[in-house]
Image (cartoon, coloured by chain):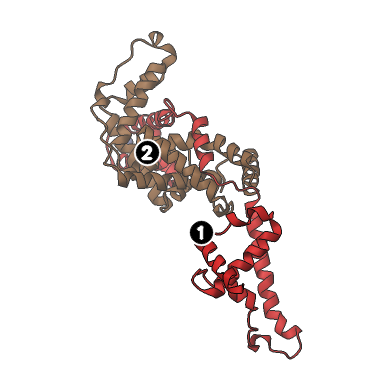
Chain colours: A red, B brown
């Protein structure tokens, strides 16, 4: 016998099975299922089908699954070596914050001197010389190279000295020696 | 919200804590806990073995490189991982053509002999699985995601909604629609036959 209750029951059967209906609606459907063999049959079929899906869907992809150990090897290879990296970053951020705070506090702690308005002190001459791009044609730079070689000659045995500069540089060095003589 | 049982959840939290300290063992433990589930999810959605392997690998690499982004207050680790996997599967749908599994499989799979002849019902299970796999392939990606998360992985509607990034009501109706679509697709096979196969 198909009636309004059958229609209502069919429309809400899945929600009834999923436990999503109000207690009143649940009671209405439960009462109807007890009295209507057609709807009860439909309910049992749907319930069985849900159970079957719960049993079968987890089987999909279970057979022929990959070698998970091998996949782990591939994943591990892509991970950065990050021993204590998060702590390292935390420490870096902490240091940056500390430096920033000190910069803010310093003008107040150093009396009435406004250090932010002080003209920058000129850099040392040797720093200026080192900042310039080496150009062997310029005699100033040649002097810089010569100075650096003398520093190296203090560190290395004297026998290694001729192998350090390029042939072009050696020529300029010889020229320089000639000038001094 | 937690998917893991209470006892297990603490263990997973410990694994996560080890990962955040840079302990490789933490990553390994999380991987062994979730790898097969993530692969199964990816396979059920993509229905392609190589794609599922690639997406599983991508999911773990992304998750492990971004562990500091995981917020235990917002989601369980499982739903976080599932969200990453689903998003990567969706990228894969866009890259690839629609699934072209032959629905005729539904009607032509081998019907097993009497129960005593099938070794522990494994053939019956295989046939039932093949039929359901072919039916899943014919669903739209959203319906497939909903039914696989709900019935294949036992997620609650709330978790399905969270992973699929949609309202809970939408998740519920998607599961319902997928359920009905599968029922009608598997009707030619006969629910009774599917039941028969599974009771072997
Ligand atoms: Zn009825």
- Comparing B89 with B166, the one in front is B89
- Residue A156, horizontal then vertical, whole percent: 68, 55
Instruction: Say above or below: B140 vs A1.
Output: below
Q: CA distance from mark 1 to mark 2?
A: 68 Å
The residue lying furthest to the top in this view is B117
- Residue A81, horizontal then vertical, whole percent: 59, 46
Q: Which residue is mark 1?
A: A167
- Residue B35, horizontal then vertical, whole percent: 51, 36
> Are the numbered discs 1 and 2 placed on the same chain, yes or no?
no
- Comparing A90 with A52, the one in front is A90
Q: Residue at x 38, y 50 (%)?
A: B170
Element type at mark 1: helix
Q: Residue at x 35, y 24 (%)?
A: B128
**Residue A8 visible in this rendered orientation of the protein:** no
Q: Chain letter of disc 1?
A: A
The answer to whether residue A1 is left or right of residue A98 is: left
Q: Chain letter of disc 2?
A: B
- Comparing B90 with A48, the one in front is B90
The residue lying furthest to the left in this view is B104
Element type at mark 2: helix
- Residue A103, horizontal then vertical, whole percent: 68, 78
Q: How many marks?
A: 2
Q: Nearer the viewer, mark 1 or mark 2?
A: 1
- Is the residue indicated by label 1 positioned so its CB lies within 8 Å of ligand 1? no
Q: Which residue is mark 2?
A: B45
Q: Quadrant of ligand 1?
A: top left
């Amino acid at each position: 016998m198909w009636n309004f209750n059958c229609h209502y029951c069919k429309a809400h059967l899945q929600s009834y099975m999923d436990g999503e209906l109000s207690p009143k609606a649940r009671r209405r459907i439960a009462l109807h299922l007890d009295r209507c063999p057609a709807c009860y049959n439909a309910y049992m079929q749907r319930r069985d089908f849900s159970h079957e899906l719960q049993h079968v869907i987890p089987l999909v992809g279970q057979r022929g699954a990959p070698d998970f150990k091998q996949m782990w090897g591939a994943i591990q290879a892509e991970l950065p070596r990050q021993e204590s990296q998060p702590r390292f970053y935390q420490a870096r951020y902490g240091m940056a914050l500390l430096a920033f705070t000190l910069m803010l506090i310093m003008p107040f702690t150093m009396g009435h001197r406004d250090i932010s308005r002080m003209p920058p002190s000129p850099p040392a001459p040797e720093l200026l010389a080192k900042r310039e791009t080496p150009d062997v044609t310029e005699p100033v730079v040649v002097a810089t190279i010569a100075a650096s070689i003398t520093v190296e000659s203090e560190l290395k045995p004297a026998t290694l000295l001729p192998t350090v500069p390029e042939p072009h540089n050696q020529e300029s060095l010889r020229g320089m020696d000639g000038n001094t003589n | 919200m937690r998917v893991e049982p209470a006892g297990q959840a603490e263990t997973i939290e410990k694994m996560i804590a080890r990962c955040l300290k840079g302990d490789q063992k933490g990553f390994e433990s999380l991987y062994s806990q979730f790898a097969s589930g993530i692969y199964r999810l990816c396979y059920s959605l993509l229905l392609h073995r190589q794609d599922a392997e690639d997406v599983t690998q991508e999911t773990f690499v992304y998750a492990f490189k971004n562990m500091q982004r995981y917020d235990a207050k917002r989601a369980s680790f499982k739903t976080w991982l599932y969200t990453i996997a689903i998003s990567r599967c969706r990228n894969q749908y866009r890259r690839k053509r629609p699934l072209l599994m032959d629905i005729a499989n539904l009607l032509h799979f081998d019907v097993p002999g009497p129960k005593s002849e099938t070794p522990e019902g494994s053939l019956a299970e295989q046939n039932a699985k093949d039929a359901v796999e072919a039916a899943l392939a014919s669903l739209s990606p959203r319906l497939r995601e909903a039914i696989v998360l709900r019935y294949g992985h036992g997620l609650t509607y709330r978790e399905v909604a969270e992973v699929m990034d949609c309202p809970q009501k939408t998740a519920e109706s998607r599961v319902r629609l997928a359920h009905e679509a599968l029922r009608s697709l598997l009707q030619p096979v006969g629910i009774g036959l599917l039941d028969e196969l599974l009771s072997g």
